[in-house]
Amino acid sequence: MPEKKYISLEDTAQLLSTTPLNILMHVKRGLLIGMEENGSWMIDCRSLENLLQKTGGGKVEDVCASGCAGKHACNGGCS
């Protein structure tokens, strides 16, 4: 049986204890790889595994919030 390559947006959000909208923001920021298929978003399992490995399952520390002051990985380059 082939290894699963994609997981649903909702299942990803549940695994990361967050919302589907936050997962889409992770895709936009390049933290996860996702694709829209038949109107539903799917997240690449390998990118999810990499993110989980990087964060230990915790919150992503280098995600910039509104009003970024350059304290994160962007070094103030947020737009």
Image: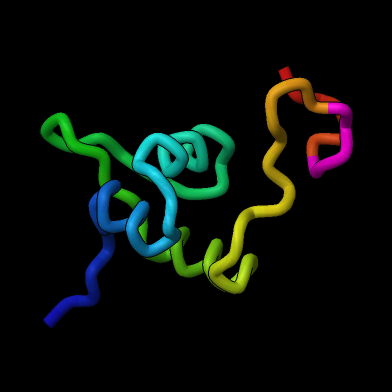
Hey, which quadrant is residue 19 in on the image? Answer: top left
- Which image quadrant: the C terminus? top right
* Along the viewing direction, whichever of 14 and 72 lies nearer the viewer: 14
Colouring? rainbow
The image position of residue 32, as x and y in percent, is 48, 49
Instruction: Report the side of 79 relative to 1 (left or right).
Output: right
Say if 18 sits above or below 68 in the image: below
The image position of residue 24, as x and y in percent, is 42, 36
Q: Magenta segment: does it hold 71?
A: yes
Instruction: Report the side of 56 relative to 48 (left or right).
Output: right
Q: Magenta segment: does it hold 2?
A: no
The image position of residue 23, as x and y in percent, is 43, 43
Furthest residue toward bottom: 1
Say if 75 sits above or below 7 in the image: above
Classified by dominant secondary structure, the portion drawn in magenta counts as loop
Instruction: Report the side of 56 relative to 38 (left or right).
Output: right
- The residue located at (77%, 21%) in the rendering is 67
Furthest residue toward top: 79
**Residue range corresponding to the magenta coloring:** 69-73
Q: How many marks?
A: 0
- Which image quadrant: the N terminus? bottom left
Hey, which quadrant is residue 46 in on the image? Answer: bottom left
- The residue located at (42%, 58%) in the rendering is 17
* Along the viewing direction, whichever of 65 and 44 lies nearer the viewer: 65
Say if 6 sits above or below 23 in the image: below
- The residue located at (36%, 52%) in the rendering is 13
